[in-house]
Image: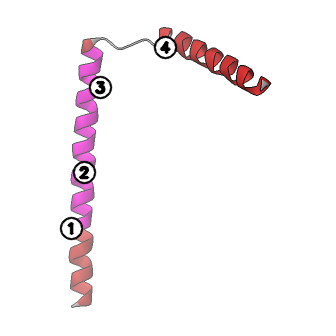
């Protein structure tokens, strides 16, 4: 019976700590957010292209060896 009171206190403390941490978050401004988004998109497309090219070359090489 005493455990439920203790659990409720722990939950309240946890939420208070969570709320305090959310106050410490520093959100980026619009310019920084745009730059970082573009960087992520460019790197993703670049890596996707490299992986697709490697897949094509490996598949072509394996088909050449098998036939």
Q: Which mark is residue 56?
A: 1
The disc at residue 36 is 3
Mark 4 lies on a secondary structure that is helix
Rendered image: mark on residue 48: 2
Q: Which residues are magenta?
A: 31-55
* Local secondary structure at mark 2: helix
x and y percent of residue 39 in the render? 27, 31
* Horizontal arrangement in the rendering, residue 50 relative to residue 21 (left or right): left
Q: 47 above or below 24?
A: below
Mark 3 against mark 4, which lies toward the viewer?
4
How would you classify the magenta stretch by its main secondary structure? helix
Inter-mark Cα distance, 2 to 1: 12 Å
Tell me where residue 66 sits by quadrant.
Answer: bottom left
Mark 1 crowdedness (10 Å alpha carbons): few <14, some 14-19, many ≥20: few
Q: Earlier in the sequence, mark 1 or mark 4?
A: 4
- Give the spatial CA distance, label 1 vs label 3: 30 Å
* Real-space CA distance between mark 4 and mark 2, rounded to the nearest whole angstrom: 35 Å
Task: Find residue 22 and name its label.
Answer: 4
Residue 10, image quadrant: top right
- Residues 58 and 12: in front is 12
**In magenta segment, residue 54:** yes
Query: Marks 3 and 4, Cα distance to the nearest angstrom?
Result: 22 Å
- Of badges 1 and 4, nearer the viewer stands 4
Q: Residue furthest bottom?
A: 67
Q: Are marks 4 and 2 in contact (CB under 8 Å)?
A: no
Q: Residues within 10 Å of mark 2 (few under 14, many from 20)?
A: few
């Amino acid at each position: 019976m005493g455990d439920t009171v203790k659990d409720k206190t722990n939950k309240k403390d946890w939420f208070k700590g969570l709320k305090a941490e959310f106050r410490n978050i520093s959100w980026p401004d619009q310019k920084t957010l745009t730059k970082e988004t573009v960087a992520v998109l460019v790197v993703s497309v670049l890596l996707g292209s490299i992986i697709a090219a490697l897949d094509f070359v490996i598949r072509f090489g394996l088909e050449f060896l098998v036939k």
